[in-house]
Amino acid sequence: MWQYGYYERVLRDDESTPGVIEYIVNNPVRAKLAQNPADYSYWGSSAYGREDLLAFIERGERWEP
């Protein structure tokens, strides 16, 4: 389910996957719900752990699931 006013979209080839993941993970920080993304417990993935996503962002690599 998507909240009203929000939508999904496919990443384009020229978009940085780590950049998009970082943007999403940092949403709670921008909303002042947490000081650090790791402090916010309501984000993550059923396929990838929070620590894995944070490490991926830090490495800045291309996403290869």
Image: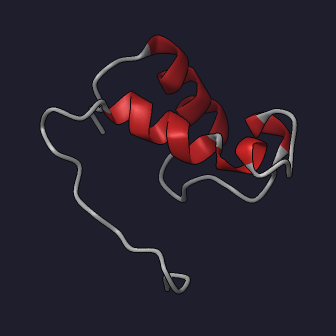
In this rendering, would 48 be left or right of 51? left
Can residue 33 be seen here? The reply is yes
Res 7 → quadrant: bottom left
Q: Nearer the viewer, residue 13 or 50?
A: 13
Query: Residue 16 at what x, y percent from top left?
Result: 30, 30
In the rendered image, the quadrant that contains the C terminus is: top left
**Residue 53 falls in which quadrant of the image?**
top right
Task: Determine if residue 49 is in view.
Answer: no
x then y, percent, for residue 15: 24, 35
Task: Looking at this view, name the residue that lies furthest to the left.
Answer: 13
Residue 22 drawn above or below residue 45: above
The percent position of residue 18, horizontal first and vertical second, equals 40, 29
Query: Which residue is most to the top?
Result: 59
Q: Is residue 26 left or right of residue 29?
A: left
Horizontal side of residue 34 vs 49, given as left or right: right
Q: Check the image and report above or below for 56 versus 20.
A: above
Q: Is residue 41 depicted above or below 65 in this figure?
A: below
Front position in the image: 26 or 46: 26
Query: Is residue 42 shown above or below 57?
Result: below
Q: Residue at x 49, y 80 (%)?
A: 5
The colour scheme used to paint the residues is secondary structure
Q: How many marks?
A: 0
The location of residue 52, given as percent across then percent down, is: 56, 31
Q: Residue at x 34, y 18 (%)?
A: 61
> Residue drawn 54% across and 59% down?
46
Compared across the picture, whether 64 is left or right of 44 comes to left
